[in-house]
Amino acid sequence: MADPLSTLLRLRRRAEDEARRGLAAAIAAETGAEQGARAARASVAREAEAATSLEAGDAAVEAFAAWLPRGRAAVDRAEAARQTAAAEVARQRAALSHARANARAVENLLAERAAEAASREASRRQAGLDEIAARAPKPGTG
């Protein structure tokens, strides 16, 4: 029969591995969202620069003015996605920390149990040695 604590430790380690993968995925998503937000801001900046350049005519300025609400909306969506991704990274970090703590708790229980078993074995051996010593003839009495 499998030791319940060893089984629990395997499950806790598996949960820790899953939490680690979840964090990696969340970090990748956050990186993508940050790149998206940067790209959206850069797009607005490029369009603004083009519209305000000396070569730009009234049509370019009017086109920029018409496009700007969509550009700002894209920046807002990208920033919201970045914030959501950052919150997910924080949630996944907490989940990993929790999973690690759970695994360490079981590891500590196993270590305590092993130490107790070693102590009992040492006591049993000492008792055996004490019994042998008690049965042995005392010097000068034999």
Image (spheres, rainbow, N blue to C red):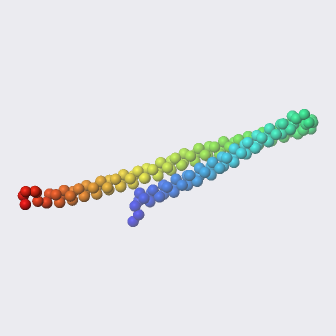
Using the rendered view, name the quadrant where residue 72 is placed.
top right
Determine the residue positioned at 32% across, 56% down.
117
Is the C terminus in the top left, top right, bottom left or bottom right quadrant?
bottom left
Q: Specify whether residue 73 is in view.
A: no
- Image location of residue 28, percent across then percent down: 65, 50
- Image location of residue 9, percent across then percent down: 45, 56
Horizontal side of 68 relative to 6 (left or right) equals right
Using the rendered view, name the quadrant where residue 141 is placed.
bottom left
Count of labels in the image: 0
Horizontal side of 65 relative to 125 (left or right) equals right
Horizontal side of 39 relative to 29 (left or right) equals right
Is the N terminus in the top left, top right, bottom left or bottom right quadrant?
bottom left
- Front residue of 92/134: it is 134
- Image location of residue 18, percent across then percent down: 55, 55
Using the rendered view, name the quadrant where residue 118 is placed.
bottom left
- Looking at this view, name the residue that lies furthest to the bottom: 1
Determine the residue positioned at 90% across, 34% down.
54
- Looking at this view, name the residue that lies furthest to the left: 141
Q: Specify whether residue 103 is in view.
A: yes
Determine the residue positioned at 87% across, 37% down.
51
Determine the residue positioned at 66% across, 42% down.
83
| 126, above or below 57, in the image | below
- Image location of residue 138, percent across then percent down: 10, 57
